Amino acid sequence: FKRPIDSLCNIAINRTTMTRYQRLMVAVASAVALAGAAEEATEKKKGEEESLFDTVVKQFFGSDHDCDGPNGCPQVTKHLRTLSAAASTSSGGYITSRGDSRALGWTGTTRSIGAAISDAGWTDGLGHFHNGYRYVSAGDIEYFVNNDLMTTPPFNGKHEVLVPWPNQGDDQVGPGQYVGYSRRQVCYIVAKTLMGAGTSGYDNGLTRFMRTCARTGGFGKSLVTLLASCAADPTLQNGGQGPMVLVLRGKDPPSVAETRGVAARRNLGDANLRICQYSDGVGDLPGMPQVPGAGCSRQQYWGTGRDFMTGGLDNQAVIDISASWLGGYVLGNACGLGGGQDERLMVYFPEVAAMTFFLSASYPFPQLRQPAWILGARQFFQDLDGSARFNDYKLNKDVPLNSDLETISIRGQSFSISGSRPFLAFMSENQGYMNEDANNMAAARRNRHAGQRTINSNDRAPFENQVRAWYGSTALSSYNQEVQPVLKQLVGSLGTGPWLAGLWWGDSQMGFLASWIGQALAAESWGGRLPLDYYIYSDFTENPGNQCYVHSRSNCAACTGKCSSHPLPSSAFWMPGTAFFGGKSCADGGSSAYCGTNGIENVYAAWAGRGALELWDHIQNQFRYNSHLGSTVFDVIM
């Protein structure tokens, strides 16, 4: 507040016709009301504050309200609760479902923005944006930060930042909650942390991340590129807040019993499955629905095609196969591109990285917990597909500044938001189900480990938990009711690769079945069919070659052969040393010895018109007493 709380109390005390308790309640109510519109209150004069006070009194009190009575002021209490929620709802583009937020000051900076740009190795060639027709130099970024962001701070004109408070578990958002920041506010947070500032009383993860090699490596380059876009952004001119970046945490997972109850009334056709044979080396599969061409064109030897990670299909969400926290194990382990899919996406989506780290102060992993949507984020570099074969720091010159904006409504307030690349991160429930020794890795990468086929509830990673993980993470009902209309407006389909079967070493056939069943369940909450776009690779960046096993024998052999003859460069993947086959990265060294008779097209033809619970129970029954390690999962259930 520009004026101290005392001035508000004095206004109340001057109303001598009120009881002492009424005066106290109105003073508090006035303070809460003003907090909810702090950016407006700072410009009001005392007379206007008194007018607001009169409004509060009229709303709360009448001749029949006696706050000195034995029952206190129930109506005042009710309105105070309403105003308390509204007070923390929004401020200059900031909005949250949490009941409280805290304005935190910044610690001093340790370097100039010019030094931060130089340290990140950022070059002027990374600042050419077709949308807005702007070429941004390092000097332009420096001028924008020093003479715009820092002279007109986006949080009520003060050098502070609003954060949902207190933390709920391991981050500040909490299960079933949401928070949104304007694009200007995100740029401001990024600029402050790049210059070495921290937040007083809150050891945020982004500042901690910038104390590692990430700042002078690829992550620093990515965040500086975000600032370059801010300098070019027409929506941020003249102090504009710009569009919103919205973070949504999922609720705690449903029970297996609840999940099965939904499965009992759903058909597998409700999943609206579509496939894209992106880099599998196999001809088109008969009878399989296809992802539209805007979101599916095959990878070439010289460059990427279109898949769910490159983007191309409007409103298709990219699914990040995450750990328990977004971004995986980048903190202290990665400076830039490297690791698995999760880690690489953080470089390509700097707004996702900024929100992921800033909204947690947890130890040792100060990162947003899954499942989580991040809406309004954009992909700043090009050529990252599911294989990561061609990933580099090559600017996506077509990154949208204002060309893909949609208008959304939350709590009766309208905001603009970038709508082209919804981002959803969640994990399968099989992390750490086995030791990563050579024998276990050889079996798991061939889809022949008993731990991949467990179905008993007491087991480490039963199949039912995988169905629940997909359903609980993708169901619209898993997210705050206030933002469900926003999700329905912005999300047109879900794009994924070999979920479950990446660096957690699950069975790729089990992963497909769990996601297919889980998506059939989730579609109900979306009011219809939300398509599941399933992409098939010979060389996915995590566990390359393993997804070939979703094919029938001859197709599987072609897929594994492609992986073997055209292996990924070492820059495109990471695996522990025990995962290699004689120094080769492809599953089973590219051999087709563990391929099965039935492929994904056979399973689809047999089950697409049948009940989700029917298939779920069939899988459970087949593996209840026998792991059938001599056969593929598809062959067993067929």
Image (spheres, rainbow, N blue to C red):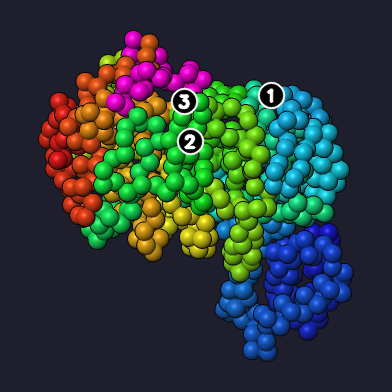
Residue name at image x 76 percent, y 30 percent: 124
Residue name at image x 69 percent, y 24 percent: 216
Q: Name the residue under label 3.
A: 301
User: Which quadrant is the C terminus positioned in?
Assistant: top left
**Amino acid tagged 2:** Gly
First in residue order: circle 1 vs circle 2 = 1
Residue 356 drawn above or below residue 409: above
Q: Name the residue under label 1.
A: 216
Asked if one can make out residue 282 in the rendered structure from this viewpoint, the answer is: yes
Is 333 on the left-hand or right-hand side of 94? left
Q: What stretch is highlighted in magenta?
A: 558-582
Q: Position of residue 88 (x, y in %)?
A: 65, 59
User: Helix, strand or loop at disc 1?
Assistant: loop
Cβ atoms under marks 3 and 2 closer than 8 Å: no
Residue name at image x 41 percent, y 19 percent: 567
Asked if one can make out residue 507 in the rendered structure from this viewpoint, the answer is: no
User: Helix, strand or loop at disc 2?
Assistant: loop
Is 488 on the left-hand or right-hand side of 89? left
The image quadrant of residue 57 is: bottom right
Q: Mark 2 points at which residue?
A: 305
Q: CA–CA distance between discs 3 and 1?
A: 32 Å
Circle 3 Cα neighbour tier, 10 Å, few/some/many (<14 / 14–19 / ≥20): few
Circle 2 Cα neighbour tier, 10 Å, few/some/many (<14 / 14–19 / ≥20): many
Q: CA–CA distance between discs 3 and 2?
A: 10 Å
Nearest to the eye among marks 1 and 2: give it.
Answer: 2
- Outermost residue toward the top? 582
First in residue order: circle 3 vs circle 1 = 1
Q: Position of residue 36 (x, y in %)?
A: 70, 64
Q: Viewer-proximal residue, 108 or 496? A: 496
